[in-house]
């Protein structure tokens, strides 16, 4: 395992638990923490240069998000996601998000949709700046806020859970290949279609975007990013 210190320095003004969680999420995205592997809190703490307590607390937060699972007397295992799992998660998201986007296009006001533009543009900016944590956070905010315009809180919770379970590993290689920018730009395209009142076009764009995300995930799994 490499030096995890590069993924986040502890700042006095932030809660140590939150800062450690940020560093661990960054290591997950970069592929430094590998699916199926068990990591001990003391070992991770040594890599991060902190005590074991905030690491345990942060890992419990990640466990609630489905990113890791506790292993008795050993530590935490990075949860694995199979190709079958990913296909099923993508299918569920497609069944939920595509028609919802069409419905929101027909019911939301132009003002409501325009409020999402800064977030859509932030996704693109984060991708171009190679800020992977910021990219995923902005992407999460955009999708959930867009679905929130449907007025169905349970729908938003369900998609939020699916997103956590189908999170991306190894984005570093995709970023270096320039593949994330094109995916990021699809958010602006989607928003433009919705503002134009093109429900059918918006549904097609969302379907294509989810398929694109699934393809990016598969490509990310093929290359052992972070272990060069």
Image (cartoon, rainbow, N blue to C red):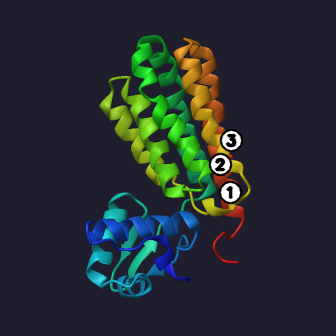
What separation in Å lies between label 2 and label 3 (alpha carbons)? 6 Å
* Residue at 33% in and 83% down: 50
Instruction: Give residue 201's quadrant in the image.
Output: top right
Q: x%, y% of residue 166?
A: 52, 52
Residues at discs 3 and 1 in contact (Cβ within 8 Å): no
The numbered dot on residue 180 is 2
Residues at discs 2 and 3 in contact (Cβ within 8 Å): yes
- Which of 20 and 11 lies nearest the eye of the viewer? 11
Q: Secondary structure at mark 1?
A: helix
User: Is 65 placed left or right of 138 in the picture?
Assistant: left
Residue bearing mark 1? 174
Above or below: residue 82 compared with residue 70: above
Residue bearing mark 3? 182
- Which of 111 and 218 lies nearest the eye of the viewer? 111
* Residue at 72% in and 63% down: 222
What separation in Å lies between label 3 and label 1 (alpha carbons)? 11 Å
Q: Secondary structure at mark 3?
A: helix
Residues at discs 1 and 2 in contact (Cβ within 8 Å): yes
What separation in Å lies between label 1 and label 2 (alpha carbons)? 6 Å
The numbered dot on residue 12 is none
User: Is 96 placed left or right of 221 in the picture?
Assistant: left
Mark 2 surroundings within 10 Å by alpha-carbon count, few (fewer than 14), some (14 through 19), many (20 or more):
many
- Which of 10 and 145 lies nearest the eye of the viewer? 10
Instruction: Give residue 146's quadrant in the image.
Output: top left
Q: x%, y% of residue 220?
A: 67, 59
Q: Secondary structure at mark 2?
A: helix
Q: x%, y% of residue 103?
A: 47, 17
Q: Earlier in the sequence, mark 1 or mark 2?
A: 1
Image quarter where the N terminus lies is bottom right
Instruction: Give residue 200's quadrant in the image.
Output: top right
Mark 1 surroundings within 10 Å by alpha-carbon count, few (fewer than 14), some (14 through 19), many (20 or more):
some
């Amino acid at each position: 395992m490499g030096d995890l210190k590069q993924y986040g320095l502890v700042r006095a003004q932030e809660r140590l638990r939150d800062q450690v969680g940020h560093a661990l999420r960054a290591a997950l995205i970069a592929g430094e923490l590998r699916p199926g592997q068990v990591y001990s809190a003391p070992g991770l703490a040594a890599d991060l240069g902190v005590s074991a307590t905030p690491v345990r607390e942060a890992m419990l937060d990640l466990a609630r998000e489905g990113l890791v699972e506790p292993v008795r007397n050993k530590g935490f295992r990075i949860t694995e996601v199979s190709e079958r799992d990913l296909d099923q998660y993508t299918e569920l998201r497609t069944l939920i998000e595509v028609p919802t986007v069409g419905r929101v296009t027909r019911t939301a006001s132009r003002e409501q949709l325009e409020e999402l533009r800064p977030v859509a543009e932030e996704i693109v900016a984060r991708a171009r700046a190679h800020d992977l944590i910021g990219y995923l956070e902005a992407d999460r905010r955009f999708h959930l806020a867009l679905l929130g315009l449907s007025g169905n809180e349970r729908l938003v919770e369900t998609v939020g859970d699916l997103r956590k379970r189908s999170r991306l590993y190894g984005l570093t290689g995709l970023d270096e290949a320039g593949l994330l920018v094109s995916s990021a730009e699809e958010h602006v395209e989607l928003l433009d279609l919705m503002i134009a009142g093109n429900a059918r076009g918006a549904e097609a764009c969302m379907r294509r975007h989810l398929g694109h995300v699934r393809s990016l995930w598969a490509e990310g799994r093929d290359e052992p990013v972070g272990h060069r």
